[in-house]
Image (cartoon, grey):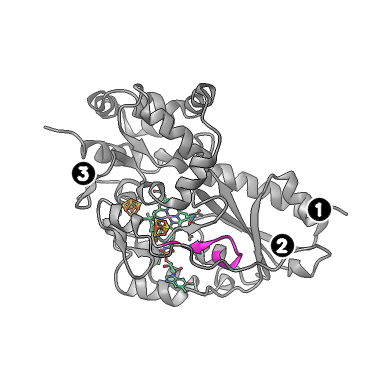
Amino acid sequence: MKDFKEILDKHEILKWGVVNDPLAHSYEHYKKWVEDGNHGVLKYLEGERAEKRESIQNYYEDFKSALVIAYDYSRTSKVSEKFYESSESNGFRVANYVLGFKGRDYHFELREKLEALAADFKEILPNVEIKHSLDTQPVLERDLAMRAGLGWFGKNSMIINKDIGSYFILGALFFSEDITKAEFEIPTPKLEVDHCGSCTKCIDLCPTDAISPDSRTLIADKCISTFTIELFKEAEAPEGMEKGRGEIFGCDICQDVCPWNKRIIRQSDEVSSEEVEDFKNRNRVLVDMILTPPLEDVIEKLEGMSNREYRRVTKDTPVSRTGRVGILKNLKFYKKD
Ligand code: B12
Ligand code: SF4
Ligand code: SF4
């Protein structure tokens, strides 16, 4: 019989942990955060969907175990930096997760990976039901990752892992059986302690002062990520956004400045020109349409396009999320009249 580790190795899963308790440990922090209105325009975080987050069983009644996985994309942050430094770049940036999964929206790319993994588990656990969680489910995924021993809540609210930093996407499989009781060797997760210490770099360098200094949370409406990814129509940009680095979809400033990410990037191999070429080819649509032409040309091209055409061109990529109007709103923020 294949063992647990063999399946994980086959799927090249390096950072993972198992959790059996359905209860979120930081739910009270979450509840207070929403009650205080810090979620702002992110209405999907309140009401019934907020209450669901208290226990995974509110979302999946038969939950017995979770396999929580960190999908690392830290390499992209080093490669993209090389691209942004090159003369080809027009000086505008998208978040690294956008470019980190072969140019595809990670909700598609990683869902396929989670489904393939679940299929292999089904072979050895045929009577077990398996569901997945990947960002959009009403689950406190960072709390789950913390409980799985994958890292600590940084002051920028990211889960940070000592070995891989915070550039990873979280995904999980939920099982209807306690998999720690199967014939697998599963280590009990060792909870990570806080390694932020006295550092305040993310708080000090966030251009819009979006990070609440005392609670390891953000004020969502002040975050550039909210403005550029979650708002699809005309909206007021958060104060201070002009002090950023030209973010047009997502924001990575509070991760880029974090010493835990800096160390990993510094210690990793140098980026070759072939790697940059490969990166550009994998992200062809974004590179050609948004990240290299002069701003005026990008805006002109998008203005001349129909919404339908934008959806067609950006299909399967993360930037299709905002629609044409949403991305134009982000770009026009930088247009000097
Ligand atoms: C809403 C949301 C957002 C919102 C709000 C962000 C936020 N910080 O809440 C916006 C649009 C701004 C956003 C931005 C980003 N997001 Co987002 N987002 C989510 C989502 C859907 C829900 C997060 C949530 O519940 N927030 C509520 C607040 C209250 O939670 P929190 O900030 O983590 O606060 C916790 C801690 O403060 C903790 N806490 C506080 N004090 C204490 C004390 C103790 C003792 C303990 C134990 C805990 C604790 O309790 C709180 C509740 O858990 C999750 C997916 C999911 N289903 O969970 C992804 C998720 C958090 N996002 C993710 C990513 C990648 C991003 C971006 C990097 C994307 C980008 N480049 O633009 C940025 C990062 C911004 C940032 N610094 O957080 C990843 C994070 C992975 C990781 N390594 O942590 C997630 C998990 C998606 C995924 N499946 O991978 N996001
Ligand atoms: S993602 Fe950007 S705007 Fe949001 S908290 Fe981090 S640095 Fe600030
Ligand atoms: S920048 Fe400093 S304070 Fe912020 S998350 Fe990283 S280590 Fe923690």
State the image coordinates of residue 138 (x, y, percent, origin top left).
Answer: 49, 64
- Residue 300 as seen in the image, left or right of residue 201: left
Residue 150 falls inside the magenta stretch? yes
Residue under the point 65% across and 61% down: 17
Q: Pick out the residue farthest to the right.
A: 1
Numbered mark located on residue 114 in the image: none
Q: Which amino acid does label 3 sit on?
A: Glu
Tell me the residue at 49%/41% (across/down).
266
- Which label sits in the foreground, 3 or 2? 3
Q: How far apart are marks 2 and 1 (CA)?
A: 12 Å
Question: Residue 242's mark?
Answer: 3
Q: In which quarter of the image is the N terminus?
A: bottom right
Disc 1 target residue: 123
User: Please, is residue 61 above or below residue 211 in the view?
Assistant: below
Return the residue nearer the eye: 65 or 70: 70
Q: Distance of mark 3 from mark 1, alpha carbons? A: 53 Å
Q: Give the range drawn in magenta.
A: 146-154
- Residue position for label 2: 129
- Pinpoint residue 173: horizontal percent, then vertical percent: 64, 58
Q: Please tell me which residue lies in front, 313 or 116.
A: 116
> Label 3 neighbourhood size at 10 Å, few (<14), some (14-19), many (20+)?
some
Q: Would you identify the image quadrant in which residue 46 lies?
A: bottom left
**Above or below 301: residue 176:** below
Residue 35 drawn at (x, y percent): 33, 75
For image coordinates 80% across by 58% down, the residue present is: 126
**Residue 314 seen by the camera:** no
Q: Specify few, some or many for label 1: CA neighbours under 10 Å numbering under 14, 14-19, or 20 or more.
A: few
